[in-house]
Image (spheres, helix red, strand yellow):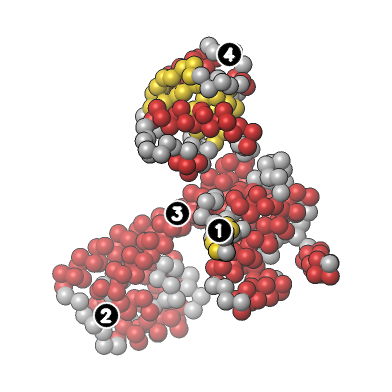
Amino acid sequence: MYFVGIDWADLHHDVAVLDEKGRELKYFTIPHSREGMEQLKQKLLSINPSPESFACLLETKNGLLVQFLLEAGFLVYPLNPKVVDYRRKPSGAKSDPIDARLLANIGRSDLGQLKRLKPDTELISELKMLTRDQDSLIQESTRLTNKLIACLKEYYPMALEFFSKPTLPVALKFLKHYPLPDLVRETTVPELAAFLKACKHPQPNQTAISIWQKAQEPQLRASAPTVRAKCRLMLALVAQLETVKEQIAAYDEEINRLFQLHSDSRIFASLPGAAGRLAPRLLAEWGDDRERYEDAAVVQALAGTSPVLFQSGKYRFARQRRSCIKPFRRVMHLFAFQSIRQVCWAREYYSTKRSQGKTHHEALRALANIWVRIIFAMWKNGTCYNEATFVAARARHRAA
């Protein structure tokens, strides 16, 4: 077995190859290009023609370099960058050659404890990327919404009172049609009602009267330069919001289509409160490789639901797990929150934790920790959620 430490970067990669005795057989640098990848393959295979005799260690499990290594048949072992930091010399010296050799040495000494990378299926991989990218778009939508609200407060605050949310489709169309406060004051109720009808508002007449009355009330007036400048910004933000919201809706359609194609979709769709956006995200983060996780405790650590114990002498406490898969932690947190609205035992458990002095997020993490064990059993056995099964199991556990 040969151990290949690869310190990857955007433009080039440093590669160190060690044998089982720790002797350095090769050290070289390759560019991040197709030619560079072929050079890496040729130099490794010149040592041994069998790709499976090389254990490649990197500080990432994504990217074109990892994809190339897997397609070429090499064994890939991704490492957490914190593991490499802990193994540095006491001097703390850091450079690309040092990191490459350090990665190879970690593989030589700890290969039995490392997890070989097995890529997701194409369907799961695409679903995971789509859900995570959509989360980024949703965050962008939230950022634009906050900027729009701040902008309206500076020159057009009464517009925030016209609709329940300033980002509703009808609200965005209204802002484009009536971008200035004076335009709303000068319009009539029939004109407002006709506009709302054209936007398919459910209550156009009542809403038109409400808007007209609010517009006629005394309002704080911004200066003319402020109105002109902020009106331009408002229109720019509305245009961006409409585009982002259209893309989010398009993502929903594609994510739902891929989710329905997977055989495990029925398992995650059966979870209470997971319908809509949570079920596809749960499937994407769990994956479909039944051999990936040894037990539920592994998933609890990866999802960040299980606490980390710190103990030294008489000093002992548990803290939140920081090192985890952040999108996995987020979807479990959101699902736990939804479950307390629909599941009696989840609501009781959450209330018990709160009465014990736990914060809202601590109680949700504790509840998510239980849900991970339930979902793991469902996922492993290929069964849908049945509350009676869990309640009976909990009763047996309490009796024992």
Give amino acid for label 3: Leu
Which residue position holds label 2? 186
Q: Nearer the viewer, residue 323 or 211?
A: 323
User: Does residue 72 show up?
Assistant: no
Of residues 332 and 203, the one drawn nearer to the viewer in this rendering: 332
Image location of residue 87, percent across then percent down:
48, 38
Q: Earlier in the sequence, mark 2 or mark 3?
A: 3
Give the residue type at disc 4. Answer: Asn
Please state which of the two labelled residues, at mark 2 or mark 1, is closer to the viewer. 1
- List x then y, in percent, for residue 283: 64, 50
The residue singled out by tag 3 in the image is 137
- Residue 39 visible, this angle: yes
Q: Position of residue 308 (x, y in %)?
A: 57, 57
Task: Compare marks 4 and 1 and give the one earlier in the sequence.
Answer: 4
Mark 4: few, some, or many residues within 10 Å (few <14, many ≥20)? Answer: some
Q: Looking at the picture, which amino acid does disc 1 mark?
A: Ser
Whichever of callouts 3 and 4 sits on the residue coming sooner in the sequence is: 4
Distance CA(mark 4)–CA(mark 1): 48 Å
Residue extending farthest front: 313
Give left or right: position of 202 versus 159.
right
